[in-house]
Image: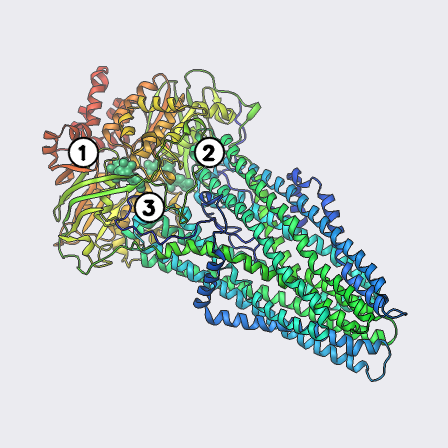
Amino acid sequence: MPRRSAPPPVPDRAAAHPPGPAPAPPRAAGAPSETTAGVPRQPDRRRRAGRAPHPPGATRRGVRVVVRGARDEPRVLGLAVAVSAVYGAGTAAAGWLLGRTTDEVLTPLFAGEPGVGRVDALLAGLALTAVAVVTAVAVALRRMVAGRVFANLQARYRRRLAHQYLRLPIAWHHRHPAGQLLANASSDVEASFMIFNPLPMALGVVVMAVVAAVAMVAADPVLALVGLLSLPAMVVANIAYQRAMSPRVVRAQALRGEVSAMAHESFDGAVVVKTLGREGAETRRFGAAADRLRAANVDVGRTRGAFDPAVEALPGLASLAVLAVGAVRAASGDVGVGAVFTVVYLLAVLASPVRAFGWVLAELPRSAVGFGRVRTVLDARGRTTWGESPLPAGGLSLQMRGVELAHSRETGEDLDAGEVAPRRRDGEAGTAAPGSGAGARVPALRGVDLDVPAGSTTALVGPTGSGKSTLASLAVRLLDPDSGVVRLGGVDARELREGSLPSEVALVPQSTFVFDDTVRENITLGAEVDEGRLRGALETSQAAEFVDALPDGLETRVGERGTSLSGGQRQRLALARALVRDPRLLVLDDATSAVDPAVEAEILTALRRPSAPGAPRPTVLLVAYRRATIALADRVAWMERGRVVDEGTHEELLERRPAYRHLVTAYEEAALAADDGRSTGAGAAPAVAGGRR
Amino acid sequence: MSAPAAPTPGGTRIAREAGDGVVATVRRGLALSPLMRRGLLGTLLLGVLATAGRVVVPLATQRTVDAGINGPDGPDPGLVLRIVLVGVVVVVATAFVSYLVNRRLFTATEAGLAELRTTAFRRVHDLSALTQSSEQRGSLVSRVTSDVDTISQFLQFGGLLLVLSLGQVLVVSVIIGVTSWQLLLVVLACFVPVVAFGRWMQPRVSAAYSEVRARVGRVLGGVSETVVGADTIRAYGAETRTRARVDAAVEDQRRAQVRAQTLVATSFSTAVLGAGVVVAAVVVVGALLGVDGDLTLGQLTAVLLLVQLLTGPVQSLTEVLNELQNAVAGWRRVLALLDTPVDLADPGEDGRDLPEGPLDLRVEGLGYAYPGGRPALSDVDLSVPAGTRVAVVGRTGSGKTTLARLLTRLQDPVSGRVVLGGEDLRRVRSASLRGRVAMVPQEGFLFEGTVRENVALGREGSTTEDVHRVVDELGLTSWVEGLPDGLDTRVGQRGEALSAGERQLVALARARLADPDLLVLDEATSAVDPGLDVAIGAALERLMAGRTSVTIAHRMSTAERADLVVVVSGGRITETGRHADLVVADGHYAELHRAWSSQMSPAG
Ligand SMILES: Nc1ncnc2c1ncn2[C@@H]1O[C@H](COP(=O)(O)OP(=O)(O)OP(=O)(O)O)[C@@H](O)[C@H]1O
Ligand SMILES: Nc1ncnc2c1ncn2[C@@H]1O[C@H](COP(=O)(O)OP(=O)(O)OP(=O)(O)O)[C@@H](O)[C@H]1O
Ligand SMILES: [Mg+2]
Ligand SMILES: [Mg+2]
């Protein structure tokens, strides 16, 4: 995991977006929800718990999501709606046909009336079969096409989000927790467009209801009235039901996110948990969260238990009412059995599709909330801007003037407005101080001036936390300064042409990120690299030996974050990654800390050789503590508390900077001090070591 | 005293999922969750009762048509009213019973699942796999989260639906059969092929969906690279490659999803076709029967309505079966986790406590190999008297971290044993071990929260004063004061809002707060500046006086000051001794040290 730092100079928050927790359908429509199983990373939803699920106007905005989706996928969606209409008409037509058959074929036939024969029954059967075939085909198409709309939209927005993540500046990334961004691309996108699964069907239901209404009215207007009154009642009951459910479902979903985030963090920090013997405490914490989730789920169950049977009973009650009224009207001779049967039958057929319709309406706010978050990311404006200048040829100098940069100490910007305090881990010592995390922007760099001449090697030395890594990120333009300027080859880095840097400038960061890919891909990162160069980079970074020992050599997959490699092995991989590019500016951020000393010197010497005879020497900026490393440098820049307070040769700084001297000679001093206090035998050691040289 | 049986060579792996059938898995799952079993039978009986209530409308229709409207004396509204009233009572009663079913079901299953989740969570922490491989970590998280969710989804929706549907099919079939056995045959003739086709499709649908899930995993993996690896991608201009990978993964997943949907749509629509054809067939056959006087019109209409009660279950059967497969697969994965022998088991009551006072350390014939890897350590013997400061040095990948993990029982050896204070580590009670042994790993991990909270984790029940004291003891007060909110500065996710060195300082303070008798430091100060490193080293030396410590460091200054230097090379200990002696011996150590000291004091 890379370090995260610095906010951008441009405020890139999009316009206000809807607050509210992540939605989740009470139950995946048809297909199992794709985020329910086997997914490696569950979103970090902790901070979303406990907010109102339906902000005002959400339904309206939900409609806008539908419109937006319809614009994105007009043809497929249109097709889906068309076949849905056929399905709706077909289903209702079957009911109507059945009623007609009852009245005109079955009743006379059973009564033994002349003029109606078996052939008529057969014909009716054929007609019903034909309608069934058409309906079935329409259903199949509807499901396929609706599924395709959902899949297409989902894919489209996942791609767009990923592209946006690749485009947005690092500073933006540093302000947003990784878990949240991941959740955005997975469950928020899913929630936004889930509605497109049942949507065509719901539109088909409208057609179905109209056809059914016509059929009912044709059968008998009075019975139709009794029956049809139950349809809006069903829709309303369903909406009430969903409205009652959805805050509860949303809460359960948020708690599920919390449980998952907790499991993630706890397993991520397993070494710490284990070595401190905190498994019990962690289990209690997790158990408490699991119990909150249990309570929330039971709450969902209770609500469902109360509403579901009631909603389900409605069509039954309506049918019974139709029977009662039908009997009265039959007694007065106004209707026949067929009419009664038609209405009852149509009610039975309509019951579940109409429920689906209510479900879609209730789903709208969820889409709105999910899509609100997606849009926040898509609308984020803080792009890294580039100019038109090419990178000057020849050796590259690096210059900084008055560079200031402040990291934001916020825990991270939520994609929703508002914030819920994260749960504390430990009881007593955890009282949060007033003003903690209040978004205080803390300057990490305060007016840095630095000159690294082309072809030179400059060591950047400074105490822990003095801002070295921050400066290194600026040098390769991972970050832009809040104020001041960074020049590469004399050109303001912001004026450079897009894409001109990565091939010429390389940073080996303090901690290595390893891609889930082969060793080769991890080094080339997609660049065309000939075998010789690759080999050379491996040799120089001293990675060749262990890479060759891997089961498949360069083609070995190193897995997520490279856990199967030792710390030093990962670091060498990162070095090879930089070296293979023959960069003109190389920035090493303490990149050899896990490399043993015997190897480090060789690496550093090799680094400074020009890539080809006659080529300029690369410019090197290296963060280092070891004296030999520093000795390889032409110049040393000494940092203290976010400023380069002195520049010069090692000797000059030793002379005039006590703090510098103290830092770089700390080990020798300590050794000397120890020797003074020690018995004679051991005292010879440093002398022996020094003498061998 | 013989060592306890060694775990399977190659460390831990999660047990393979048992090949149990659906019924066996469900039975085992229920057996492991007593809370879930409670009242299950009653719930099922109530469920059957609720189903029975559903047939009231068709039956009422039949009576109305036959006796109420087409009765011998013409329409009889009074009779119909009575029928309708009975119907209303039954419908309302059914609704109430359904309510009870839902309540009981949710209460019991959720209680059982919460229990299962927590048990599984604890089990994961007892497996060394967790700290070895982050690949498995993802799947471990899903075993306590989404896998359990799938079970819960299924039990509360599909499972009940399945049971009730079967009940419904049975009840309705019986009623149809009683009404007219010929029509029952017609109905069966139409639905049996549908069900058969559904069953035939079902494994294909499951396979298609597991394909979808696998690809969703790949999509999320790709997206997470764009987020987590943003720095590296940007610095190396790897956007194009990464974008191409994400796009490919997204497109793959979309295709898989569409394919799965197509299969589902096909099998669902055959059910719709069956439902339509069955109506046509019933009408035709019913008409023929009616002509022969074997059937009344009311009976025929009742059958037509009853058939509607069959279509629902038949249609949803394929989907529910699919859900069942998912749930059973999830359940199997959780059960497999519970089946995995705890390789870092706490001996609990039978265990022993470490003796009071300083601890001596003995390592005998120690060997270790990571799952599927070559031996990382072999035949390591070492004897460390109590109170000794040990420095471990060696080249990258030589096995130092592996040794540290074995000394602190983050994993158990494949062969040999570690004896601390005279006790085999595997016999030491966890509470005693963790209270007395602390380790600061190579990669410092901080939990989201404040500096204070992270330090306080070192010991249960520690106070703010303790945290202040430790910070002071290690000479970190001025560093803390320089932080924006002092001890209340938030460290960010995984501690990323601190610099690398600062993260290590927090981890060190945390270990110091634990006040251990054996302290293992694995390059714990690799990113800390030399001035601070020396100061901390001196402070620790003072604080740990008389106690045992093992320090792994590339900085030879540690080795120079140690009582005992251990040189690891290629997974073996090649040299041990005091610094001075090893330098004189002029072996591997002397070479390492020369390289280092030449770096510290440059020639020229
Ligand atoms: N993402 C971040 N959010 C907030 N503050 C940060 C972030 N990254 C670094 N800082 C702070 O900025 C300051 C400088 O950090 P930086 O990582 O540049 O230090 P450094 O000199 O590289 O330290 P080290 O030697 O430990 O690597 C530190 O005080 C650190 O706490
Ligand atoms: N989780 C793992 N799975 C598989 N192999 C591993 C794992 N961890 C380490 N290894 C391998 O075991 C060997 C020893 O690794 P170890 O981490 O103990 O080395 P180290 O001496 O600590 O190295 P470094 O100085 O780089 O930290 C290496 O070859 C490494 O690739
Ligand atoms: Mg740094
Ligand atoms: Mg190591």
Foreground residue among A376 and B22: A376
- Residue sitting at 48 percent across and 40 percent down? A263
Q: Is mark 2 within 8 Å of ligand 2?
A: no
User: Does mark 2 fall on the same chain as mark 3?
Assistant: no
The chain carrying label 1 is A
Residue A684 coordinates in the image, percent (x, y) = 20, 21
Find residue B303 and report its image quarter.
bottom right
Q: Is residue A502 left or right of residue A224?
A: left
Asked whether, in this view, residue B426 is left or right of residue A464, the answer is: right
Q: CA distance from mark 1 to mark 2?
A: 37 Å
- Mark 1 lies on a secondary structure that is helix
* Other-residue count near label 1 (Cα within 10 Å), few / some / many at <14 / 14–19 / ≥20: some
The chain containing the residue under callout 3 comes to: A
Residue type, label 2: Gln
In front of the other: label 3 or label 1?
3
Q: Is residue B106 toward the left or the right of residue B468 in the image?
A: right
Label 3 CB less than 8 angstroms from ligand 1: yes
In the rendered image, residue A297, in percent from the top left (x then y), is placed at: 58, 44
- Residue at numbered disc 2: B411
**Residue on which disc 1 sits:** A627
Tell me the SS state at disc 3.
helix
Are callouts 3 and 1 both on one chain?
Answer: yes
Labels 3 & 2 near each other (Cβ < 8 A): no
Tell which circle, 3 or 1, labels the residue nearer the N-terminal end: 3
Closer to us: mark 3 or mark 2? 3
Q: Real-space Cα distance between discs 3 and 1?
A: 33 Å
In the rendered image, which residue does mark 3 sit on? A174
- x and y percentages locating residue A111 in the rendered image: 86, 76
